[in-house]
Image: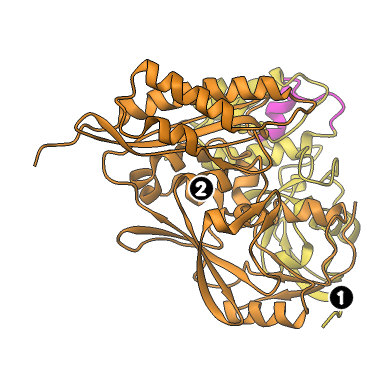
Chain colours: A yellow, B orange
Amino acid sequence: MTDTGTVAITVSVNGVAHTREVEPRLLLSDFLRHKLGLTGTHVGCEHGVCGACTVLLDGYSARSCLTLAVQVDGCTIETVESQGTQDALGPIQAAFRDHHALQCGYCTPGFIMTVADLLEHHPLENDEDIREALSGNICRCTGYQNIVAAVRELAKARGPLT
Amino acid sequence: MKPAPFAYVAATSVQHAIEALAAAGGDGKIIAGGQSLMPMLNFRLVRPSVLVDINRIPGLDRIEDTGKMLRIGALVRHRLTASDPLIAHHVPVLHEAMNHVAHHTVRNRGTFCGSLCHADPAAEMPMMALLLDAVVEITGPAGTRHLPVREFLVASLTTDLAPDELVTAVEIAKPAPGTGWGFAEFARRHGDYALACVAALVESRDGAACNVRIAAMGIGDTALRLSAAEAALEGSGFSDEEITRAVSALRDEIEPMSDLSGSADYRRHLAGELARNVLGEAWRRAAPEVPA
């Protein structure tokens, strides 16, 4: 019963199916970084407080440090690598650059993926909404002002939720 | 910051989960949303030999109207509780409380029943379950039992749940139509653990208060029902003087602790002022009884 051996899982990450043998205790964050080499997802606190490791799990934001890789067998994961490349930034990344919404950049992948969920599912009608919606992500550089400005512009460009 | 090794069972039915817990011989742990359990696993504060994942069990992810009750299944995530029209209509105080539960990313995963099982004294779900006199549906090898949440919550982070049992749902009796409600929470940062939180329900009969229910958290070892304050208001007209009397009864019956976020005296004061606002709000919302 206490077989802690590996389990085979197949996960779609950024549109590509990956099959790997994993230990049950392997965190999704470590699966992405160590098994798949997708180091865009950053690991900060590893207990769900900082938000740096946020990814999309079946379209909704989730802490990859509070999710086990075995739990996402058959699921769809999107990481910051899905959002664009250095040469062709995605719209959220471009808005962050335009508004100088990052300095050291460590928290940025988590913010980007959180915002990807927010733009899909939340009205973001005013700055208070936006600040509340970003409250699960910690940034120690920017003071948040420029992140809020970037999200405000993205929400305006998106228009009201249908 | 990595969990200790464990075996993993992706349960396909409640029966399967119960069998896996039994086979673990008291050393199994259920995982649903994992938003409380995963940090404890990462810190190795808990080291189960078997983790039983209930996320793939069909049918547990629903909120159902069973007539007098609403039934919240074990996989109902905070996101659903926050947006569910049945909850918003029948239990607006819970709908409001959901706005204060962590933040969107945690709400996407965390569950009502899981939060109740974790029994964190500073979490909203145990307090709201107490306020609403919820009943916990528990399934184990001997079948299903129902336990009032007052008996389910034993102490901080401790419940009556046996190691071979699973909470399959929480049932909430719909408050009577026209029940007034109030909710207020004070936290340093939105979504953070509350320094104090108070919620209340009250019905009005011929201008007199009845079925007064007041719950609070952040001010003791566990979430609490404040029975002295409730008794002080039962039958009253909720005048300012009567509310003030209830607030002092409340301050006398709680024993907050001092910590880095605030002293016991500060918390006692804060809880009283939150209660004053919440009670006034609940009474204003209570519909006067319509003559037959």
Above or below, comparing residue B66 to residue B182 in the picture: below
Residue at figure coordinates x 72%, y 35% from the top left? A111
Q: Secondary structure at mark 2?
A: helix
Q: Amino acid at mark 2?
A: Leu
Q: Which residue is mark 2?
A: B130
Q: Amino acid at mark 1?
A: Thr
Above or below, comparing residue B6 to residue B191 in the picture: below
Q: Does residue A59 appear anywhere in the picture?
A: no
Residue at figure coordinates x 63%, y 42% from the top left? B123
Q: Secondary structure at mark 1?
A: loop
Please state if B251 lies on the left or on the right of A5 as rendered: left
Please state if A118 lies on the left or on the right of B87 as rendered: right
Q: Total marks drawn?
A: 2
Res. A6 mark: 1
Discs 2 and 1 carry the same chain letter: no
- B101, B286: nearer the viewer: B286
What stretch of residues is rendered in magenta?
A: A91-105
Could you tell me how far apart the alpha carbons at marks 2 and 1 are, in whole angstroms?
Answer: 42 Å
- The chain identifier of the residue carrying mark 2 reads B
Circle 1: is it few (<14), some (14-19), or many (20+) Cα within 10 Å? some
Circle 2: is it few (<14), some (14-19), or many (20+) Cα within 10 Å? many
Res. B287 mark: none
Magenta stretch contains residue B125: no
Residue at figure coordinates x 63%, y 81% from the top left? B16
